[in-house]
Amino acid sequence: MYFIIFDLEFNQDVASLQNFDGKGSPYPFEIIQIGAIKLDLELNTVGTFNRYVKPTFYTRINPFVTDLTGITTEQLLTEEPFSEIYKAYTAFTKERDSIFCTWGMSDITELFRNVEAQQLSPRFLPQRVINIQPYVSTHFNLSQKNLLRLQHAVELLHIPITNAFHNALHDAFYTAEIFKIVYNSSIQPKPYDPSYRTIRAKRPSRVIDTDKLLQQFEKMYARKITTEEKEMIQLAYKMGRTNQFLKDG
């Protein structure tokens, strides 16, 4: 059994969507990089995984994603598709009773969604997970509702910053270093069921008025904005809702 600390980078470029007929959102977050660190039960690093993924659903990388991650469309054209990377990744995780460790739950959710969208089997993936992020808050005697950004946690724990963030392997490395510091026997993995959906009290449906949002940008810049700029604004809004870019005031 191993701890598999992993991180993903995604792309979403609505205008270039093709070959997607999956369930759920018509605009999936498609994995373009998988980075992982494998730890043994003594928390020794025993392996690393870093693969870029040739997109299947989008024909280009959104400029916003390129600015954030440095990953370009041209860079991914020579990579293997997700189905092949997935085979390599499940070989790396090796044992189904290993434990996935993540910074937040969005990456494991999107991993299983991509597996489903590509019509692959999840049966070789670990089925237990530790979300490290709230335990870091506990480490600093904060409420588990007060979640820290990865970079802020790295800085507070005095972990040397040797590589840029928003790279799957680098972020997996930093998460693994954090895990080595905060892990204790009281932290237990929880079963992960990708089909489970939390039932919440129904609230009146509220959606962002995209037209007004874009009109406001045009008013601010005193000009019509391009189709590419519209896509970047909408993607930035969606990614912002994941809370991964929040910082302490």
Image: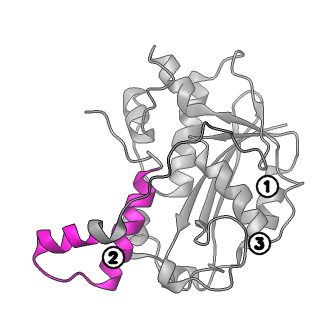
User: Which element is circle 3 on?
Assistant: loop
Q: Earlier in the sequence, mark 1 or mark 2?
A: 1
Judging by the rendered image, the residue that carries numbered circle 2 is 230
Q: Which mark is residue 92?
A: 1
- Mark 1 or 2: in front is 2
| Residue 102 coordinates in the image, percent (x, y) | 62, 41
Q: Is residue 10 left or right of residue 146?
A: right
| Residue closer to the observer: 117 or 125 | 117
Give the alpha-carbon distance from disc 3 to disc 1, as whole Å.
19 Å
Position above or below: 211 against 152:
below
Give the alpha-carbon distance from disc 2 to disc 3, as whole Å.
28 Å
Residue at x 12% of width, y 68% of height: 220
Q: Amino acid at mark 3?
A: Gln
Q: Amino acid at mark 2?
A: Lys
| Residue 21 coordinates in the image, percent (x, y) | 72, 78
Quarter in which the C terminus is drawn: top left
Do residues under tags 1 and 2 come within 8 Å of each other at their CB atoms? no
Per the rendered image, the range of residues in magenta is 214-241
Quarter in which the N terminus is drawn: top right
Residue at x 40% of width, y 41% of height: 151
Judging by the rendered image, the residue that carries numbered circle 3 is 118
